[in-house]
Image (cartoon, rainbow, N blue to C red):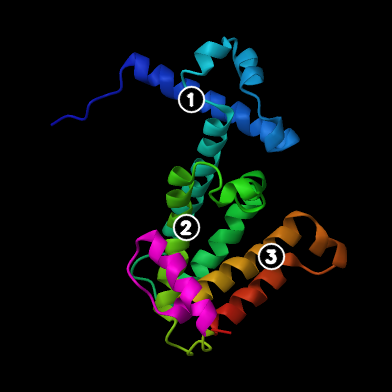
């Protein structure tokens, strides 16, 4: 059965959505999320405000769409790096490297999702959290494959309970607490390095951010 081609109206709608989101991201880049204005976008596109509201019900609706798009793009990159059939450690290092590559290529989108409370799911959690979970699932999968060598440190009981509750909310199959802890540490530690690099703090020290990041990946690879 031949695949149905989009109609002219559907193509126009998709093109308009893409242009709206492009202009919205430009506003965020120039002035932060506070600068996002549906009226300004409508004016730039030669549309009425009422016409634009047929695409996005509110400013928050559009902002959530930018966040969801960024999370899905990151997850796609990480999934591509987690090559099936490759040795577990190669998959792990590939994913960790892809995380930094994406952050450096998309610094404004990275900051939108990881350096702002709205990227955590406070805004439109029903849409944002599932999108965010995709990239975390990749972290978990590659860490689970290498978690047996060497063994991870014992997880404190209080933290164990919180990690298990956090993972249970995702609906994914259960994983050992040490894997969950390593995933959380990988995320927080690598995010710390990337944030310092993106904001220029590591460059000011004269230390190569790439070497610092690689050192963190090496430490995480040993389960420390």
The local secondary structure at tag 3 comes to helix
Of residues 2 and 122, the one drawn nearer to the viewer in this rendering: 122
Residue 135 is labelled as: 2
Report if residue 164 lies within the magenta region: yes
Which residue does the numbered mark 3 point to in the structure image? 192
- Give, as a single range, the part of the protein colored magenta: 157-179
Identified at 35% across, 14% down, the residue is 8
Is label 3 in contact with label 2 (beta carbons under 8 Å)?
no
Label 2 sits on a secondary structure element that is helix
Gap between marks 3 and 2, in whole Å?
Answer: 17 Å
Residue 55 on image: x %, y %: 47, 22
Residue 100 lies within the magenta run? no
User: In the rendering, at what x and y percent does residue 155 appear?
Assistant: 52, 84
The reply to whether dot 1 and dot 2 touch (C-beta < 8 Å) is no
Answer with the quarter of the image where residue 147 lies: bottom left
Q: Circle 1 is placed at which residue position? A: 17
| Real-space Cα separation, disc 1 to disc 2, in angstroms | 24 Å
């Amino acid at each position: 059965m031949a695949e149905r081609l989009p109609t002219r109206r559907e193509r126009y709608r998709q093109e308009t959505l893409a242009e709206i989101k492009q202009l919205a991201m430009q506003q965020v880049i120039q002035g932060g999320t506070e600068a996002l204005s549906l009226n300004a976008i409508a004016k730039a596109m030669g549309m009425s405000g009422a016409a634009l509201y047929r695409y996005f019900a509110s400013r928050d609706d559009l902002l959530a769409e930018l966040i969801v798009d960024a999370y899905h793009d990151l997850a796609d990159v990480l999934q591509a790096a987690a090559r099936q059939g490759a040795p577990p450690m190669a998959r792990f290092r590939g994913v960790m490297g892809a995380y930094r590559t994406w952050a450096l290529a998309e610094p404004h989108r990275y900051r939108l999702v990881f350096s702002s409370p709205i990227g955590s799911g406070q805004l439109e959690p029903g849409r944002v959290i599932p999108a965010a979970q995709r990239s975390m699932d990749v972290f978990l999968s590659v860490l689970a494959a290498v978690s047996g060598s060497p063994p991870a440190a014992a997880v404190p009981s209080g933290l164990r309970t919180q990690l298990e509750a956090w993972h249970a909310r995702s609906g994914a199959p259960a994983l050992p607490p040490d894997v969950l802890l390593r995933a959380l540490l990988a995320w927080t530690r690598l995010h710390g390095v990337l944030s310092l690099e993106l904001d220029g703090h590591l460059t000011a020290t004269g230390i190569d951010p790439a070497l610092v990041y690689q050192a963190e990946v090496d430490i995480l690879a040993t389960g420390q």
